[in-house]
Amino acid sequence: MKQKAGLEYASAFFSKDNSENYDHLVHYATFGMDSRWKKKILENVESDSIVLELACGTGILSAILSQAGNTVLGLDYTFSYLKVLKQKGIKIPVVNSTAELIPFRSTMFDYIITSYLPKYTTLDILINECFRLLKSGGMIILHDFTFPKYRLYKVAWEGYFKIISLLWRKDKRWKYVFDELDVLIRSSQWDLNVFEELEKLKFSQIHKRYLTFQTSAIITAIKP
Ligand SMILES: C[S@@+](CC[C@H](N)C(=O)[O-])C[C@H]1O[C@@H](n2cnc3c(N)ncnc32)[C@H](O)[C@@H]1O
């Protein structure tokens, strides 16, 4: 099967057919880990900051960031996901755009944060855009699924993915996602490849933390 690239995945995975069911899916398919991971993301953010959340989707993380006392702007490619964010009463400005071409002026943000985007995107373009938009001393925070590195965790991940794929493929709104997601996570290696891009732009204090048996990672770095 030929692999898709960047926005092709976003268009194929996310639509108005599954936008209203997304929060339910992410909670159950990660066994509630998504909430924990998002709390870990927040631990890196000082309150009262100006935050851009890329690929904010239905606003699960935007709401947490906003409740923690930050000014949050959300950006997402899929309009129906932003519509759900608004229906949930999350009061932040949002932009329907791509994370690779962000319609804001340079050096505006203290933090640029994204959860579940890195594996879909062209990393060098994304990191360049983040560099442009961050203030000096600002922080980029990237979070996404990762394919475990330890053999034992790999075996457990394979088993876990087989089970959740069997279950969620029965739901036609998510069938396509679960036909392809494991291949994408396995091949992406964003958690390894992003280092080169961050280093090229002289980001400092690059820090990687694996979570829940290496099934996801948070990478943070500071713009010089
Ligand atoms: C799995 S959802 C994650 C939503 C949210 N970040 C969360 O943590 O729940 C992925 C989101 O990424 C968005 N997306 C994927 N590629 C994108 C891109 N290149 N630019 C902007 N949004 C993108 C999709 O539209 C979708 O809403």
Image: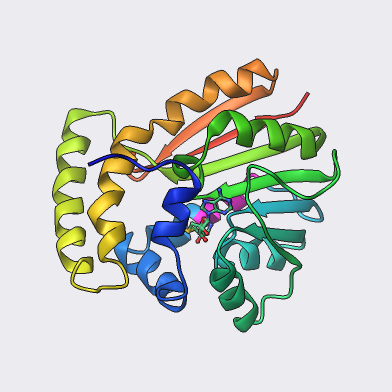
Q: Residue at x 20, y 59 (%)?
A: 165
* 206 to the left or right of 189: right
Residue 174 higher or lower than 10, as above or below: below
Q: Which residue is drawn at 40% across and 58% down?
A: 12
Which colouring convention does the figure follow?
A: rainbow
For the magenta stretch, what is the residue range? 38-44
Question: Which quadrant of the figure has residue 147?
Answer: top left
Locate residue 187 relative to residue 88 in the image: left or right: left
| Residue at the image point whose x is 23% and y is 55% from the top | 179
Q: With 201 as the anchor, is 179 left or right in this view?
A: left
Which residue is drawn at the image coordinates 72% and 52% (left, top)? 52
> Would residue 213 be visible to someone looking at this image?
no
Magenta segment: does it hold 42? yes
Estimate the x, y position of residue 71 in percent, counting from the top left: 79, 60
Asked if residue 126 is among those painted magenta in the image, a careful observer would answer no
Compared with 159, 171 (above or below) is below
Quarter of the image holding residue 58?
bottom right
Q: Where is residue 39 in the image (x, y as percent from the top left)?
A: 54, 56
Report the magenta stretch's main SS: helix
Query: Residue 118: percent from the left, percent from the top?
Result: 50, 41
Q: Quadrant of the C terminus?
A: top right
